[in-house]
Amino acid sequence: MLDITVFLSSFCLELLSWSSILSELPGEIILWRWTDTYASALKKIKELVNCPQVHLPWYHPSNVPKYLVYDASVIGLAS
């Protein structure tokens, strides 16, 4: 969830602070309890992602052309 949260946070500044609450949850090895804090954080994240400022239009070929820009080296790849 973190990658999409980071991307969407450029449209909604509050998103990262609310998602940090959920990132505190331990991995699948340790048992954890879903508390009201986590439930309210998830609810707020859903509200923020669905707000008009974060609304992203669907891709349509007739829109402005899209470009793929990439760079590669011996030790890494970036886009």
Image (cartoon, rainbow, N blue to C red):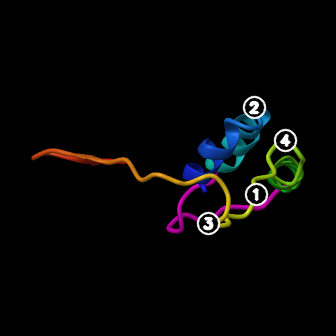
Mark 1 highlights which residue?
Answer: 57
Residue identified by numbered label 2: 13
Q: Tell me the quarter of the picture where residue 20 sits.
A: top right
| Cα–Cα span, label 2 and label 3 | 31 Å
Which residue is tagged 3? 31
Distance from disc 4 to disc 3, alpha carbons, whole Å, reads 36 Å
At label 3, which amino acid type do we have? Answer: Leu
Span highlighted in magenta in the image:
25-35
Q: Earlier in the sequence, mark 3 or mark 1?
A: 3
Mark 2 or 1, nearer chain start: 2
The answer to whether 71 is drawn above or below residue 27 in the figure is: above
Of the 4 image quadrants, the one containing the N terminus is bottom right
The span from disc 2 to disc 1 (Cα, nearest Å) is: 19 Å
| Numbered disc 2: secondary structure | loop
Residue 53: mark in rendering: 4
- Distance CA(mark 2)–CA(mark 4): 10 Å
Specify whether 3 is left or right of 79. Answer: right
Seen at 78% across and 34% down, the residue is 14
Mark closer to the observer (4, 3) = 4
The image position of residue 22, as x and y in percent, is 69, 50
Which residue is located at x 68 percent, y 66 percent? 60
